[in-house]
């Protein structure tokens, strides 16, 4: 399973008022493990950055002046996220801005919100921790994730933090061993006589192991919001 944890920084908060994306950060997860592949770029938004937004992410107009436009990186971005579930915090904010950039680049392109699988970690956190603060900083503190290197918002830094948050919030679904690659090697098929000579030892789970298994399945079911396939 391929997942892309993503974050954006923008010139302001409202895409409807012409605000644009100025930074994209993506972290790839394969079978719930970081693959080591990332996508990161700063973008020239062809407009000024609002002062309120600049105070949040620290990115100003002078820094962005020589950066590529979205149209220059669109193909690479789309190739990186192709076929993946997209994971973002307050996902519709990021998706709305990215869809706007795609539309400005090529109105014929399909929108992410209509074609990609999207998981909103803010909604997931609200279900898991109702009535509590669920911004990224609060979740990092709650889950013991170090944020000392995060002085300002940054798309790639925040995407890495969100990957840690997502994996911690959904702990119990990973490390099941399904992604382990087994090399295929030729071997001779045993004949019927040799199979008959083998004494097969059958080891059955005892009551304690069955109880532990049941608890594990319940934890996976709770973390996946009732989507556990083994229950």
Image (spheres, rainbow, N blue to C red):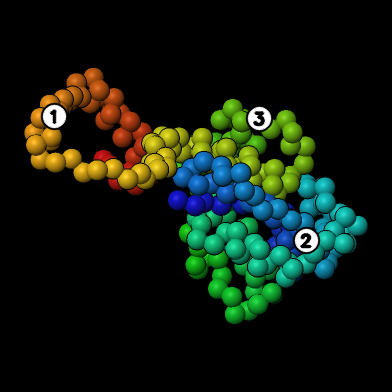
Dot 1: what SS? loop
For marks 3 and 1, the one nearer the N-term is 3
Which disc number belongs to residue 146?
A: 3
Q: Residue furthest bottom?
A: 108
For marks 3 and 2, the one nearer the N-term is 2
Residue at the location (56% across, 52% down)? Answer: 4
Q: CA distance from mark 3 to mark 2?
A: 28 Å
Camera-near label (1 vs 2) is 1
Seen in the image, is 191 located left or right of residue 156? left
> Which residue lies under the disc numbered 2?
43
In the rendered image, the vertical position of residue 6 relative to residue 189, given as above or below: below
Q: Front-most of 106 and 183?
A: 183
How crowded pointer 1 is (Cα within 10 Å; few <14, some 14-19, many 20+) is rated as: few
Can the viewer see residue 48?
yes
For marks 1 and 2, the one nearer the N-term is 2
Can the viewer see residue 7?
no
């Amino acid at each position: 399973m391929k997942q892309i944890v993503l974050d954006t920084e923008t010139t302001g908060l409202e895409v409807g008022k012409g605000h644009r994306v100025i930074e994209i950060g993506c972290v790839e997860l394969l079978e719930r493990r970081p693959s080591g592949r990332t996508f990161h770029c700063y973008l020239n938004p062809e407009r000024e950055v609002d002062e309120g937004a600049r105070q949040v992410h620290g990115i100003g107009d002078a820094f962005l002046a020589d950066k590529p436009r979205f149209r220059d990186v669109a193909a690479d971005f789309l190739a990186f996220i192709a076929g993946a579930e997209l994971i973002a915090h307050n996902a519709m904010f990021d998706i709305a801005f990215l869809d706007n950039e795609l539309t400005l680049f090529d109105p014929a392109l399909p929108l992410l919100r209509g074609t990609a699988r999207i998981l909103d970690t803010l909604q997931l956190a609200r279900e898991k921790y109702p009535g509590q603060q669920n911004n990224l900083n609060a979740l990092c503190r709650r889950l013991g994730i170090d944020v000392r290197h995060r002085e300002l918002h940054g798309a790639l830094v925040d995407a890495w933090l969100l990957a840690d948050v997502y994996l911690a919030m959904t702990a119990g679904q990973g490390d099941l061993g399904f992604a382990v690659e087994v090399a295929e090697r030729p071997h001779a098929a045993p004949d019927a006589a040799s199979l008959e000579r083998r004494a097969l030892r059958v080891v059955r789970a005892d009551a304690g192991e069955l109880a532990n298994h049941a608890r594990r399945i319940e934890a996976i079911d709770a973390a996946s919001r009732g989507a556990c396939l083994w229950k």
